[in-house]
Amino acid sequence: EKKESAANVAEITAYECQRPTLLKHHNPHITEALELLEKYYQFLDHKQGDTRALAFRQASCTIKALPKRVTRVEEVRNLHRIGKHSISVIEDIVLHGTSEEVEDIRQSDWFKCMELFTSVYGCGPATADKWYKKGFRTIDEIKTSETLELRELQKLGLLYYEDLSKSIPRDEVEVIIEIIKKEVSECCPETQVEAVGGYRRGKSHSHDVDLLLTHKDSSITATLLESVVSHLKAKDMIIHASVYVGQNTLSRVSETHDSSAQPTYTSEGQQIKRVQFDHLDKAFCIMKLTRSHDKTPLIRRVDLIVTPPDQYPFSLVSWTGSKQFNRSLRRYSVKECSKTVTAHGIFDIIERKFSTAKTERDIFDILKLNYLEPWERNC
Ligand code: ATP
Ligand code: MN
Ligand code: MN
């Protein structure tokens, strides 16, 4: 048993970005439970931050790296980043097939409602909790309520709930990519459009389509998002877009490494409270997409992100994800390389200078990491 445990430890690096994490692994029954707890604590702690939730995500990532199905809790007891709480859940699953704690949460009214309500576009945990506390239990009750005050985005999220809550299979993502590529090439020729997010990591289904746009001429990328959004609007393809622009001047880029205090602005110049993860121009859209062979349009969430050519590989890594992969990459770079990694670049904290990169491989090289393909970044 000791030998076996040692073999497992050897597979598991201190940081997720140092090893491949695939969608398919040997312990989905365990990671599913741990990720349910992650979600539960995201809901529960939405005011405090995500420390407790993160512990379950990290444990789940470690489990994904195991070379075989866990049969005894001893096999996981001393592995990196698996806390006491996770161990007790894993022990229950290994011994009894399920964890009572996890099943109780799964069955609880509050958790079920939080999952349901946060699946409405524009509704986060705070709003979902408010709706629950007011006694609402179904989407229909929310839709037909005459007392509830809803924000514009939430009204749209409810109006198109049926469409927007569908998960999007890969072949449909591909249809959407082609439709948008055609429009982009019409309004801004020679623009490069790359599908990123879960699709690029090989997921079979996505909740939205993420597209990263760039152009070899940085004077074009400076106004690309506005051009594309107005073109799509003129074609009646945008139902709603939350647009963030004008934070991407060069001076901003060099400030991004200490930018948490910077406000962000909507396209109307209105200051918004939530600070974005990066300063790329972006539009979070609800789009109406008409396919050539089918008259009923698809209503789907599409994220459009624009990056200047010199920042492209950094933005590609950042918008491919996963979120946990990005987290581990940032943590690893700061702690092990004294470098900060963002969607804009890599900055050496000691030498006080930026690195350049042409490809994703260059970025892994700069950080002295083995290259991971997008489908190996599913932490
Ligand atoms: P799904 O397939 O369900 O859409 P996903 O991994 O594509 O999953 P998204 O929320 O679409 O999830 O995010 C795509 C990638 O972009 C993730 O890697 C995430 O870290 C990054 N990301 C998402 N939102 C932002 C944001 N506001 N700013 C910067 N990066 C973001
Ligand atoms: Mn996505
Ligand atoms: Mn997205």
Image (cartoon, rainbow, N blue to C red):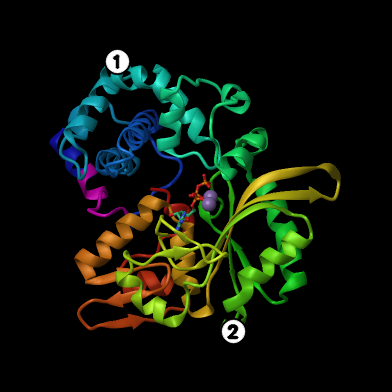
User: Residue 189: x and y, percent?
Assistant: 73, 76
User: Residue 217: x and y, percent?
Assistant: 60, 84
- Is there any visible trace of residue 20 in the rendered image? no
Question: Which numbered disc covers residue 96?
Answer: 1
Residue that label 2 marks: 219
Q: Amino acid at mark 2?
A: Ser
Please tell me whether mark 2 sits on a helix, a strand or a loop.
helix
Q: Amino acid at mark 1?
A: His
Query: Residue at horizontal 17%, vertical 30%?
Result: 74
Question: Which numbered disc covers residue 161?
Answer: none
Q: Quadrant of residue 214?
A: bottom right
Which span is picked out in magenta? 8-16
**Sequence-wise first label, 1 or 2:** 1
User: Residue 6: x and y, percent?
Assistant: 17, 43
> Viewer-proximal residue, 126 or 101?
126
Q: Quadrant of residue 106?
A: top left
Left or right of 224 on screen, residue 114: left
Left or right of 251 on screen, residue 331: left
What residue occupies the far left of the structure in this picture?
A: 2
Q: Is residue 242 above or below residue 281?
A: above
- Is there any visible trace of residue 112 in the rendered image? yes
Left or right of 289 on screen, residue 87: left
Q: Quadrant of the N terminus?
A: top left
Q: Residues within 10 Å of mark 1 (few under 14, many from 20)?
A: few
Please tell me whether mark 1 sits on a helix, a strand or a loop.
helix
> Viewer-proximal residue, 132 or 189?
132
Query: Residue at horizontal 26%, vertical 61%?
Result: 332
Q: CA distance from mark 1 to mark 2?
A: 61 Å
Query: Residue at horizontal 21%, vertical 26%?
Result: 88
